[in-house]
Image (cartoon, rainbow, N blue to C red):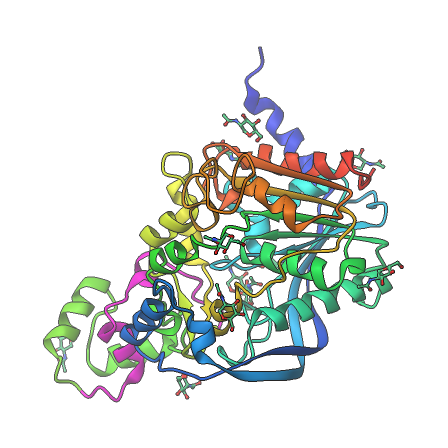
């Protein structure tokens, strides 16, 4: 038998041939009816942990405590997106992909190991086009006030606006699509579901990955993330500290840029002029994760304001997203290098979705067996008031009018479905569900 390796060039060539991708920015105008929250301090990491403590308080409701009233947010924003289509067309069907907390649009198209974890490639191979967006507020999409601007509702309005533009062909580089399937991961699933409840006619299929309607495990997520202020946690990437600023500082104080001696010298010189706020943020916060895991030195810093929180490190990433033993640590390091934050406003509104969706098309829930935030680590467990055979199956009651509903548990997998070995087989469950329920692309 010929070694398997001999076939790889052929496989890769056919993949490359059917993969046409471009990055683009989509302007959207939105009007969002949403909460007006009292802002609380979130400057330091102790402030951030205090916020989480209150957020997780048993039988308390921080959303209700901070809610002062409602507002209509109106604004023009930019949504950063990656559009891909198969060479031979897609029969007018596109999958609109919304990432979860901790990620950006690259979650769907991980380039690790020659893209063999890429959801986008799997969808393209099955004949679909894809549009993966950075959710409003995150990554290269417009950022905003973390309490009173970047909330679930505003993001759903942005997602709906992008959907409408896709249907009408109003996005320059993209033709019009007759059918739009909303695919989410985690908070992106919450928003895809929510869109189907508010605008049922604007979606043709709903795929909710890493999702359930059990809300009691959200506290595991908020605690397990060990949230820190994003701009302090990765100051060189999330903050506005610049490499050249750091180099100037090192030159001024004769500090070697070699990590260990640099830190030793900075500690010795603790009496230094701390007006160099960049260095205070970098060293005073003791967060040196992005020096250790590495980051893209030429990408401009994201400059998130205080009120954007990040999972603290690789250990929290594992707890939230990865089932030990069934993932590649090298990929987890990439996840830490490229992670993205969550806003206070998102956390305060994550649980405000309607209880039911009048959507009449097909809906699939697919969740990893050991998902922590939506199943408490065991999707086969039982929770109060969900009488389904397992936790994801309980979502059925939220879709009373769906033409088809299925809940699928992906084995040996945590919350971050795309980051596990065997992810591709899970992706195929999604494409097969669509094909079997009137949404085949070919
Ligand atoms: C598009 O952006 C991604 C990051 O999201 C990057 O990896 C890729 O190289 C970009 N592609 C093009 C064609 O610029
Ligand atoms: C918390 O309060 C908000 C705002 O009043 C409300 O919409 C939400 O349903 C409450 N959550 C729970 C779990 O009671
Ligand atoms: C389009 O290309 C894909 C991948 O090469 C292939 O599987 C599919 O059958 C093609 N579809 C059509 C309609 O030719
Ligand atoms: C969706 O379309 C149906 C049929 O055209 C219509 O009756 C219904 O009011 C629409 N729903 C919404 C929320 O627009
Ligand atoms: C960097 O961010 C801090 C905190 O938000 C802000 O006070 C400062 O003006 C910013 N500096 C630049 C150059 O953007
Ligand atoms: C800077 O470091 C170099 C090399 O260690 C040393 O020779 C020089 O004396 C130092 N200068 C000052 C001002 O400390
Ligand atoms: C790093 O950032 C630069 C500038 O934005 C970009 O052109 C480049 O593709 C990035 N490199 C990687 C490996 O993502
Ligand atoms: C965001 O933009 C920067 C700078 O252009 C680029 O390096 C990076 O790859 C982009 N990231 C995403 C997720 O689009
Ligand atoms: C279960 O449902 C009952 C009746 O609707 C409600 O009173 C109770 O609070 C629910 N329990 C939980 C844990 O949600
Ligand atoms: C990607 O390739 C690696 C190495 O061949 C393999 O171990 C892993 O299971 C693959 N991942 C996926 C999602 O297929
Ligand atoms: C991989 O995933 C597929 C689809 O869920 C499943 O049928 C198969 O049993 C999984 N394989 C392993 C080894 O878990």
> What is the x, y in percent for residue 315?
32, 51
Instruction: Give left or right: position of 334 versus 50.
Output: right
**Disc count in the image?**
0
> What is the x, y in percent for residue 441?
81, 41
Q: Can residue 330 be found in the magenta stretch?
A: no
- Corner quadrant of residue 105: bottom right
Instruction: Give left or right: position of 127 versus 427.
Output: right
User: What segment is highlighted magenta in the picture?
Assistant: 273-301
Instruction: Give left or right: position of 155 versus 17.
Output: left
Name of the residue lying farthest toward the top: 1
Q: Against 169, is 321 above or below? A: above
- Judge whether residue 301 can be spotted in this image: no
Of the pair 327 and 426, the residue shown nearer to us: 426
Of the pair 155 and 21, the residue shown nearer to us: 155
Of the pair 14 and 74, the residue shown nearer to us: 74
Q: Can residue 293 be found in the magenta stretch?
A: yes
> What is the x, y in percent for residue 28?
72, 74
Within the displayed image, which quadrant is ligand 8 positioned in? bottom right
> What is the x, y in percent for residue 172?
81, 67
Tell me the residue at 79%/50% (across/down).
360
Instruction: Give left or right: position of 200 versus 267.
Output: right
Tell me the residue at 54%/47% (across/down).
210
Tell me the residue at 51%/81% (across/down).
145
**Quadrant in the picture for the N terminus:** top right
- Judge whether residue 241 can be spotted in this image: yes
Tell me the residue at 52%/41% (across/down).
391
**Quadrant in the picture for the C terminus:** top right
Q: Against 57, is 183 above or below? A: above
């Amino acid at each position: 038998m010929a070694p398997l390796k001999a076939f790889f060039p052929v496989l890769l060539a056919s993949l490359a041939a059917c993969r046409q991708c471009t990055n683009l920015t989509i302007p959207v105008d939105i009007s969002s009816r949403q909460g007006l929250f009292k802002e609380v301090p979130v400057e330091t990491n102790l402030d951030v942990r205090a916020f989480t403590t209150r957020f997780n308080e048993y039988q308390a409701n921080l959303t209700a405590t901070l809610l002062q009233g409602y507002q209509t947010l109106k604004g023009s924003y930019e949504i950063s997106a990656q559009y891909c289509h198969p060479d031979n067309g897609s029969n007018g069907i596109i999958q609109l992909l919304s990432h979860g907390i901790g990620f950006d649009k690259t979650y769907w198209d991980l380039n690790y190991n020659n893209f063999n974890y890429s959801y986008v490639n799997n969808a393209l191979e099955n004949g679909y086009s894809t549009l993966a967006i950075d959710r409003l507020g995150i990554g290269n999409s417009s950022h905003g006030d973390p309490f009173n601007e970047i909330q679930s509702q505003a993001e759903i309005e942005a997602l709906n606006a992008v959907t409408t533009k896709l249907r009408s062909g109003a996005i320059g580089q993209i033709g019009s699509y007759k059918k739009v399937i909303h695919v989410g991961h985690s908070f992106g699933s919450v928003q895809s579901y929510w869109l189907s409840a508010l605008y049922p006619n604007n979606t043709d299929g709903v795929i909710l990955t890493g999702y359930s309607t059990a809300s009691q495990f959200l506290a595991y997520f908020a605690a397990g993330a060990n949230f820190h202020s994003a701009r302090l946690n990765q100051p060189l990437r999330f903050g506005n500290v610049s490499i050249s600023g750091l180099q100037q500082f090192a030159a001024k104080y004769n500090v070697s840029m070699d990590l260990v001696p640099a830190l030793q010298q900075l500690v010795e010189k603790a009496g230094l002029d701390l007006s160099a706020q960049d260095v205070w943020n970098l060293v005073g916060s003791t967060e040196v994760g992005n020096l250790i895991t590495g980051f893209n030195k030429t990408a401009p810093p994201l400059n998130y304001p205080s009120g954007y929180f990040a999972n603290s490190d690789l250990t929290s990433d594992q707890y939230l997203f990865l089932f030990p033993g069934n993932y590649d640590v090298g990929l987890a390091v990439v996840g830490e290098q490229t992670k993205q934050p969550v806003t206070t406003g998102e956390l305060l509104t994550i649980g405000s979705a309607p209880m039911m969706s009048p959507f009449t098309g097909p809906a699939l829930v697919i969740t990893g067996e050991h998902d922590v935030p939506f199943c408490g680590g065991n999707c086969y467990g039982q929770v109060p008031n969900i009488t389904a055979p397992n936790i994801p199956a309980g979502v059925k009651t939220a879709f009373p009018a769906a033409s088809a509903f299925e809940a699928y548990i992906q084995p040996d997998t945590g919350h971050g479905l795309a980051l596990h070995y065997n992810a591709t087989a899970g992706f195929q469950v999604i494409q097969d569900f669509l094909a079997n329920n009137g949404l085949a692309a070919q």
